[in-house]
Image: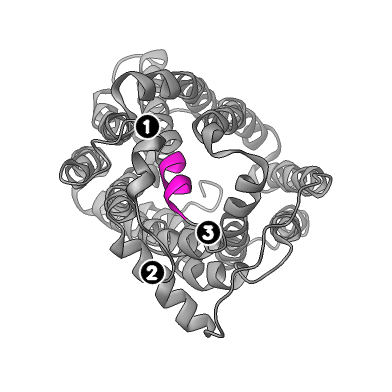
Amino acid sequence: MTTLHAGASTVGLLTAAVWAPNLLSLFVGSWVDHQPRKRRLLVLADVLRCAVLLTLPVAHVLGAITLVQLFAVALVAGLGQVLYQTAYPSFFVALVRRDQFVEANSLLSGTRSASFVAGPAVAGGLVQAVTAPMAMLVDAVTFAISAVLIGRVRVADPPVADGGGASLLGRARDGMALVLRDAYLRASLACATTINLFNLMAGALVVLYASRELGLSPGLIGLALGIGASGGLAGTVLAGPLSRRIGLGRTIAVGAVLFSAPFALMPLAQGPTWSRAGVVALVELLSSVGVMCLDIPLNALMTAVTPDGIRSRVTGAFSTVNYGIRPAGAIVGGLLGEWIGLAPTMVVAAVGGSLSVLWLLRSPVISTRTLDDLRGASVSPGA
């Protein structure tokens, strides 16, 4: 975006385009529920994202890259992500036992955190060395590798949901009603949606703020974010023991606050270059610990209360609201950044995101200590 000299509002709109396809998650998930081969859908999603990302280095070589293409790539890649995330839950439960949900999510999140540590640093170096479009070539290759690895996994396909002859629209409506009716899922959705709204306000502007306000180079920004992302590794190690000590629900609440609050520190970045970069790294580190303390127990809880056969539908319903709010957050963040400034926007986002914990306080989530406490939850598709 710095190559095309984009402003805060344009950055916000492009970030919104990446998340906009999530508004279709409810319908995609309802369709995926009735597909017998979920693993093939995961492979297809990776291949789609690989192909669309490859268009960027090609257009760069031809000197034809434009903002229109960037928006198109963001939308198609976002659609591939929606397909992947709705097919994934059934794949996960086919591989993992219920009593391993927290441990398995910790291990998977640890892998993801490791990529977050290396990714920004490598990306920043690649952008500085060979430009951003060519760095997308590496990103495309990673999706190709993912497709190959997933394709080699041998797992029994879960049974296809019996929709009783219901239409796609009917199944989608039932999926959304189920999420809104269940006390656990409803509170989790409200909390996560609030976090995503405010965190995307800040997240869409972090690189722009570090570049324009703090005067950091792309390589140094990538290094700072990479160092900070190591907090995710710490979070994956901490989430399990913390959940056992204070309970799943309270760990989710701690994660919700810690995920958002650090953005308020960003305006404090002053002094020499190392100090400014250090604040960026610290904000990312604390937030990364928070997101793992939030995601790991929350994903385990949601997986435990969702019946087999309708997991993609429930995931789609959840994602339509939870991720669908992200474009609004990115757009509001961009507009607010131009109106009141980037630093005040960071503070507003930190406060708003931290208040998401209020949704949990009057729900059964906050008192949940272990997955065994969820046995009374009723989210039957026929309820």
Query: Hey, which quadrant is residue 111 in on the image?
Result: top right
Q: Which residue is mark 3?
A: 311
- Left of 234 or right of it: where is 107? right
- Left of 148 or right of it: where is 298? left
Q: Counting other residues with Cα less than 10 Å from the Cα at mark 2, is it few (<14), some (14-19), or many (20 or more)?
A: some
Q: Which residue is mark 2?
A: 176
Marks 3/1: CA–CA distance = 21 Å
Q: Position of residue 11 (x, y in %)?
A: 43, 53
Marks 2/1: CA–CA distance = 26 Å
Q: Are marks 2 and 1 in contact (CB under 8 Å)?
A: no
Span of residues in magenta: 299-306
Q: Are marks 3 and 1 in contact (CB under 8 Å)?
A: no
Q: Earlier in the sequence, mark 2 or mark 3?
A: 2
| SS for dot 3 | helix
| SS for dot 1 | loop
In the rendered view, tell whether residue 135 sits above or below residue 28. above
